[in-house]
């Protein structure tokens, strides 16, 4: 649920955890990022940094400039100023991410895990079975059939948590137990109901089944997309996965290596809660289902 009155908790003497609800939903996450934008625009004295999360905002502040009590009152006032969620809009870039499904690199990773740590069903087959799909081709069709909302960034620089915007394309999966010790850079993973893109070779626990040659984090800032930021995505962006074959994958990887690759995106769009809710109602209508 979205709380009528947000909750606050201290994180030491310089951080406030500002909790707006207790569910994993698009509406709550949209509120989180709308409120984070309002806080930044308001330039509240003493606020140093904001970390928007799935259902909360971590607020770093200087206690010499503003007290805990005064800051919570400022945050409550800003929350009250938002009003009806259905009227909200956010600027939202959309990135087109090329991915190779059922690639050799994630297969090598899972085979290494099965040989050294624990036996498990191959990740794509587990996803097919647990989501009632026909086969791997059906998994590819469903996973690439929707835009994804960048709900949060964290765990590793540039790593994004992606929520599917089309409920018909929602997939779920358990995490590894125990986690993997390594995951190839650019791997696409699924854990719970979230998709992620691993920005570098890291440990991990999501089920893995595809890889992108397109970097989403670059500490050297070699490519044009990283000139102003080490991380590609911002919360509130959208992602659309574009399936490619091995030849296309290799061609993109070569352009990344020689520095000529340009990320494909559009940054002139706004995302409307009212428009999104109307679309959800349309695809869920009995008339639509009967027509299909």
Image: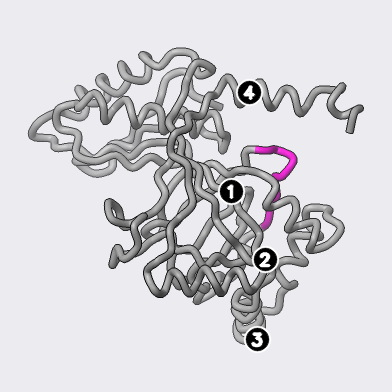
Q: Residue furthest left?
A: 64
Q: Would you say residue 169 sits in the magenta stretch?
A: yes
Closer mark to the observer between disc 4 and disc 1: 1
Whole-percent x, y for residue 249 in the image: 58, 70
From mark 2 to mark 1, how far is it between C-alphas? 14 Å
Q: Secondary structure at mark 1?
A: strand
Instruction: Check residue 101 in the rendering and tell me which mark sits there, or answer none.
Output: 2
Q: Is residue 47 left or right of residue 78?
A: left
Q: Secondary structure at mark 3?
A: helix
Tags 4 and 2 in contact by the CB under 8 Å rule? no
Residue identified by numbered label 4: 277
Q: Secondary structure at mark 4?
A: helix
Closer mark to the observer between disc 3 and disc 4: 4
From mark 3 to mark 2, how far is it between C-alphas? 22 Å
Q: Main secondary structure of the magenta part?
A: loop
Whole-percent x, y for residue 17 in the image: 34, 37
Instruction: Check residue 132 in the rendering and tell me which mark sits there, or answer none.
Output: none
Labels 3 and 4: the sequence-earlier one:
3
From mark 3 to mark 4, how far is it between C-alphas? 46 Å
Dot 1 crowding, Cα within 10 Å, few <14, some 14–19, many 20+: some
Q: Which residues are magenta?
A: 166-173
Closer mark to the observer between disc 3 and disc 2: 2
From mark 1 to mark 3, how far is it between C-alphas? 34 Å
Residue 209 in view here: no
Residue 212 in view here: yes
Q: Secondary structure at mark 2?
A: strand
Task: Name the image quarter holding residue 140.
Answer: bottom right
Dot 2 crowding, Cα within 10 Å, few <14, some 14–19, many 20+: many
Instruction: Check residue 240 in the rendering and tell me which mark sits there, or answer none.
Output: 1
């Amino acid at each position: 649920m979205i709380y009528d009155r947000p909750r606050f908790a201290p994180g030491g003497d310089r951080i406030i955890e500002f909790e707006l609800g207790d569910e994993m939903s698009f509406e709550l996450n949209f509120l989180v990022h709308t409120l984070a934008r309002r806080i930044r625009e308001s330039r509240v004295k003493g606020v140093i940094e904001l970390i928007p999360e799935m259902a909360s905002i971590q607020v770093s502040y200087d206690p010499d400039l503003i007290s805990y009590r005064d800051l919570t009152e400022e945050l409550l006032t800003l929350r009250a100023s938002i009003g009806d969620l259905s009227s909200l809009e956010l600027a939202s870039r959309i990135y087109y991410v090329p991915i190779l499904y059922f690639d050799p690199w994630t297969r090598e990773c899972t085979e290494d895990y099965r040989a050294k740590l624990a036996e498990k069903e191959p990740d794509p087959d587990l996803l097919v079975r647990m989501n009632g799909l026909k086969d791997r081709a059906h998994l590819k069709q469903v996973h690439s059939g929707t835009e994804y909302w960048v709900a949060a960034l964290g765990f590793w620089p540039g790593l994004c948590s992606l929520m599917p915007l089309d409920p018909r394309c929602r997939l779920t999966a358990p995490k590894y137990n125990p986690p993997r010790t390594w995951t190839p850079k650019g791997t696409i993973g699924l854990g719970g109901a979230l998709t992620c893109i691993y920005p570098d070779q890291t440990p991990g626990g999501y089920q893995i089944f595809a890889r992108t040659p397109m970097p989403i984090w670059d500490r050297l800032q070699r490519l044009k997309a990283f000139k102003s930021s080490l991380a590609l995505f911002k919360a509130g962006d959208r992602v659309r996965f574009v399936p490619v074959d091995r030849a296309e994958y290799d061609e993109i990887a070569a352009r990344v290596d020689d520095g000529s690759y340009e990320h494909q995106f559009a940054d002139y769009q706004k995302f409307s809660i009212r428009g999104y809710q109307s679309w959800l109602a349309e695809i869920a209508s009995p008339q639509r289902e009967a027509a299909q």
